[in-house]
Image (spheres, coloured by chain):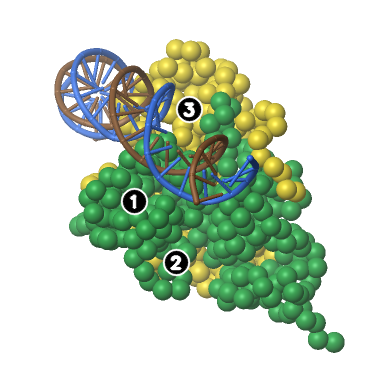
Chain colours: A yellow, B green, C blue, D brown
Amino acid sequence: MTSLIPNTCKSCSLHYDSSNFCARLTTDELVRLNGKSRFVSMKRGDALSDEALLQWPIIAVSSGVLSLQHLMADGRKSIAALYMQGDIIDLRGISNRNRCNLISLGNSKVCRLSPAVFEQVVSANPEALNTVWKNVREQTFRAIDHSVDMSKKQALEKLASFIIECNSRVINRAKKTAVAKIPIRRVDLAEYIGVQPETVSRCFRDLQNRGIIEFDNLSVVTLKNVPALREIANGDWQGDAQKVKIVA
Amino acid sequence: MTSLIPNTCKSCSLHYDSSNFCARLTTDELVRLNGKSRFVSMKRGDALSDEALLQWPIIAVSSGVLSLQHLMADGRKSIAALYMQGDIIDLRGISNRNRCNLISLGNSKVCRLSPAVFEQVVSANPEALNTVWKNVREQTFRAIDHSVDMSKKQALEKLASFIIECNSRVINRAKKTAVAKIPIRRVDLAEYIGVQPETVSRCFRDLQNRGIIEFDNLSVVTLKNVPALREIANGDWQGDAQKVKIVA
DNA sequence: CGGCAAGTTGAGCCAGGTCAACTCCGGTGG
DNA sequence: CCACCGGAGTTGACCTGGCTCAACTTGCCG
């Protein structure tokens, strides 16, 4: 009578980490969803094609880093968004949009959720709905913030923003530290913030020379001077009265 | 016994345009939501402050164009997103993000929805939920596409993208035309695509010289050569096999 | 320890930013 | 009806941040 938690799920962060979607499901829901879903391991460069995404448009990231990449006509490519542990990527309706691919930037594990069961579960379980919705909103805000970063900031500022994002997005779930883990390669980082790898390198060096950051190794940086970093990242105007009329 | 459709709603596009959220509600739901919500007219420059947004974080756009603006420490400001008729802006959870304002770019009408009633309605009415969710996903995709545009493209390409966005976003709901209405001023457009107004001007002229667009007046452009425009906008790589391994 | 991918450094160049002057247009008041 | 005004948009000249290309160094894995 009692259903048991599927083995796949037991060891999956989406389930055992309580802030994530699967942790909100009843055992029964989890079993139903798991039965129709597919847990996949990906290596660097592996892609979920857009054809595949049309059929299985909902993806939950269990570990690793995925990227949403756009390829432009001249071969330039660009990383539009990064997804990490706990993110639910809902690409329903992507069909009428520009072509894009979901590509893993390293080893990662994802769960391709059955849209049908997902939809059932979400409409039956308000708590699960809230969790997903919150995640989707966060993605939207991240995308919006990111497009601000991309549109007006210069390279150094973009990089500072990115370091801060790294610092707050993963590590600090557990404990607040002054360490940021850069979970992706320089090339990918460059593509994400829309500059050349060379520029990334130069900017890192600049921050290092100013004593603001320090490299533990290529992918781990210690933040020596967080306020300075924030200032460069150009946190938004906290200043005085804006020249706008507040209507409410 | 029968509740009547509130007058505010009768004349509001959110209700009479069937693709929008309010059109999906039962009369009873509409009355409840309307009772707790506030219909507001805004002029250019009017803002909903972030304090106000904390309390009333859900906004439906009935007409006009709103912008989500970020102000940076040095006074540079930047338009992160544009919202138009039918968009549901859900800023719940914005509190822990960077400061930003929702500012009207012209005359507009919005409805500030009661979060409580909204939440009730959405969890009770799956069709309404789907409508909102779809809109939110679209916003996310738009934000992502926009950040791609911002990060790698050059000015001319960004502008072409924007023109296409204008062409597809509003006008073509009704009929497909080769006309795009630019619903905002040059300055705002410049801020949105992350270049200077001067550059916008130069790029418009360039497109005009090449015979790709033609101005009817400042805010209405006829697209003389849509394929060329798309090519410049750099629609994504439709080309042959990508150098990625498709895992599924 | 070799070999290759990843990352860094340097030199030169150009797209677009900056600043300043100018034009265009709609509204206002005499 | 016209002169004036201010805001919006445009044009030109100059300058700089970051792209490009090529050479170099570092780090990783067998």
Residue at image point 66% right, 53% down: B42
Of residue A15 and residue B47, the one placed in the foreground of this image is B47
Q: Is residue B119 left or right of residue A169?
A: right
Element under label 1? helix
Which is in the foreground here, disc 3 or disc 1?
1
Q: On screen, B5 above or below A38?
A: below
Which of the 4 image quadrants contains residue B101? top right
Q: Mark 3 is on which residue type?
A: Glu
Residue B15 placed where, x, y %? Answer: 64, 73
Real-space Cα separation, disc 3 to disc 1, in angstroms: 26 Å
Specify whether B84 is left or right of B36.
Answer: left
Q: Residues within 10 Å of mark 3 (few under 14, many from 20)?
A: many
Residue assigned mark 2: B171
Q: Type of residue at label 2?
A: Ile
- The chain holding disc 1 is B
Q: Nearer the viewer, mark 2 or mark 3?
A: 2
Which chain is disc 3 placed on?
Answer: A
Label 2 SS: helix
Question: Where does the image place residue A196, in percent across and percent down from the top left?
Answer: 32, 31
Amino acid carrying mark 1 in the image:
Ala
- Height in image: B113 above or below A121? above
